[in-house]
């Protein structure tokens, strides 16, 4: 009789663990942590080119292998925190513009467009 209670308790605990694993996407999240880089996970977790554009900055950081923070023009917040190692060192030859549209007040003739996402998010480099 005691053996049946112990087995039932273990069985219920096992079922509870499986339910928790399923509801928290434990296996998928573990896979993503092991096989995807931090920048890719951040790019997928943050908005790409909507309000803050953090996902776009992570995308540019990964694609162009940026080590220093470029100048970032965003109408909402400063986002140099994305480059934690050298966030105080700004690379003035590179520029990321997020959601400015026609409100950009400086001359773009001196820059070459390296990446353009729907004419809303741009990565520029000085010529």
Image (spheres, helix red, strand yellow):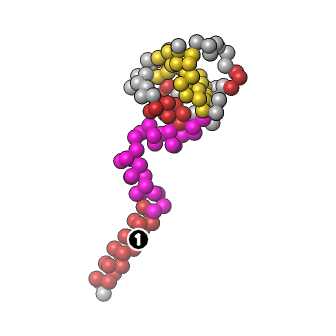
Q: Please provide percent x and percent y for residue 126.
A: 53, 15
Q: Is residue 127 left or right of residue 2?
A: right
Give me the residue at 58% from left, 12% from top: 110
- Residue in front for this viewpoint, 60 or 33: 60
Magenta segment range? 22-49
Q: Please provide percent x and percent y for residue 33.
A: 39, 47
Q: Residue furthest bottom?
A: 1
27 up-or-down from 42: above or below = below
- Residue in front for this viewpoint, 64 or 25: 64
Give me the residue at 54% from left, 33% from top: 56
Q: Which residue is mark 1?
A: 15
Residue 51 occupies which quadrant of the picture? top right
Please, what secondary structure does the residue beneath circle 1 have?
helix
Can the viewer see residue 96 in this picture? no
Q: Residues within 10 Å of mark 1 (few under 14, many from 20)?
A: few
Residue 67 occupies which quadrant of the picture? top left
70 up-or-down from 35: above or below = above
Can the viewer see residue 111 in this picture? yes
7 up-or-down from 66: above or below = below
Residue 17 lies in the magenta-colored region: no
Residue 27 lies in the magenta-colored region: yes
- Residue in front for this viewpoint, 30 or 7: 30
Q: Is residue 7 left or right of residue 126?
A: left
Q: Please provide percent x and percent y for residue 63.
A: 46, 32
- Residue in front for this viewpoint, 86 or 117: 117
Give me the residue at 65% from left, 29% from top: 119
């Amino acid at each position: 009789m005691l053996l049946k209670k112990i087995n039932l308790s273990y069985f219920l605990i096992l079922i509870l663990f499986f339910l928790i694993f399923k509801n928290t996407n434990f296996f998928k999240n573990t896979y993503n942590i092991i096989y995807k880089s931090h920048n890719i996970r951040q790019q997928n977790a943050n908005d790409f080119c909507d309000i803050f554009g953090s996902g776009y900055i992570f995308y540019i950081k990964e694609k162009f292998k940026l080590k220093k923070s470029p100048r970032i023009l965003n109408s909402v917040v400063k986002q140099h925190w994305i480059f934690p190692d050298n966030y105080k060192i700004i690379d003035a030859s590179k520029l990321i513009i997020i959601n400015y549209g026609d409100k950009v007040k400086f001359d773009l003739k001196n820059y070459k467009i390296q990446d353009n996402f729907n004419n809303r998010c741009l990565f520029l480099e000085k010529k």
